[in-house]
Image (cartoon, helix red, strand yellow):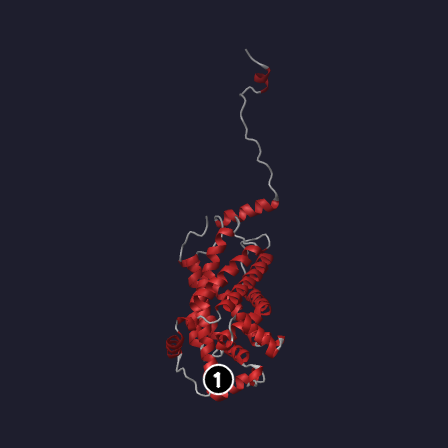
Amino acid sequence: MSTPLDKLFPHGVRAYPLPAPRQSYAARRSLAAAAAIGGRKMTHPGKAILAGGIAGGIEICITFPTEYVKTQLQLDERANRPRYRGIGDCVKLTVQDHGLRGLYRGLSSLLYGSIPKSAVRFGTFEILSNPMRDATGRLDNKGSLVCGLGAGITEAIFIVCPMETLKVKMIHDQCSLRPRYRGFFHGVSEIIREQGVRGTYQGLTATVLKQGTNQAIRFYVMNALRNWYKGDDTRKELHPIVTAVFGATAGAASVFGNTPLDVVKTRMQGLDAHRYRNTLDCAFQILKQEGPLAFYKGTVPRLGRVCLDVAIVFVIYEEVVKLLNNVWQTPEAH
């Protein structure tokens, strides 16, 4: 017996799927980007460590003379009648007394430390940031600040403090009438023999504060600029020149943000560090004897060095990671 429905649908009633709910344009674009990259776009910590080490080694060989001049000016206390009238005078006297090689005194201590420092920095940042990235691989600015702080503290404790202490002592030793250290290994052995391992950890508090704020500022600014440049297109590549400009900007921000901590750290690691009871006492004595402007000694050479430093490091890091992605297959996307 036929029914009205049989007449309307002589071939039977078929079930048709209901249309899916409409998604916003931004949601569709995010999902498309995520699908295109196969999930969250992350850098494997192993690649970050290797790329960071290579970047750090190349960078320090290029920029060390500016670090040497900055350290000399920061050690040149007003209370002891300054030896240098400025950056040019420091370079002139150093070359006059020690030749061009004098501008590279202490390079070995930084070179031995810069490779593991950058490796630890970028490796720690990727380890901390990967779980915090969204479906498209984007890291928000707050996350970059926290991860940068963690990376800076880690590198300060394990690498930067002993490396910086040795560098400052060797540069300071060169200013003496009778330099004691014949080279890096001789200097290290003498410092440890006389002061123990603690002798390589002078100014730890100041170093942790300096490196923590340094990397927090740098990664925050770099990440904010990168997010602004890419907009909604997370697959958009940064040209090396753009990366360099963003890196230099991040470096400049860190210089103006924490140079006072860098001055205190340098004094705490010099040969005259025994005059200070602790980090706060060092800061107080600088303020009392030399005035507030002393906290910004060496800003100009540091600004030049750091802007170049951060720009070079980020460019080389990004390019090495791209190269490693082509030859080293890792499960970055989940």
Q: In the image, residue 266 lies at what x, y percent?
A: 51, 74
Q: In the image, residue 13 lies at what x, y percent?
A: 54, 22
Vertical comparison of 254 with 267: above or below: above
In the image shown, does 247 or 154 lie closer to the viewer? 154
In the image shown, does 83 or 24 lie closer to the viewer? 83
- Left or right, residue 238 beside residue 109: right
Query: Which residue is depicted at the point 57% across and 68% down?
Result: 258
- Left or right, residue 21 beside residue 178: right
- Residue with the mark numbered 1: 175
Query: Which residue is depicted at the point 60% across and 46% down?
Result: 26
Can residue 318 be seen in this snapshot? no
- Left or right, residue 115 beside residue 232: left
Quarter of the figure with the N terminus:
top right
Q: Quadrant of residue 107?
A: bottom left
Q: Secondary structure at mark 1?
A: helix
Vertical comparison of 40 with 90: above or below: above
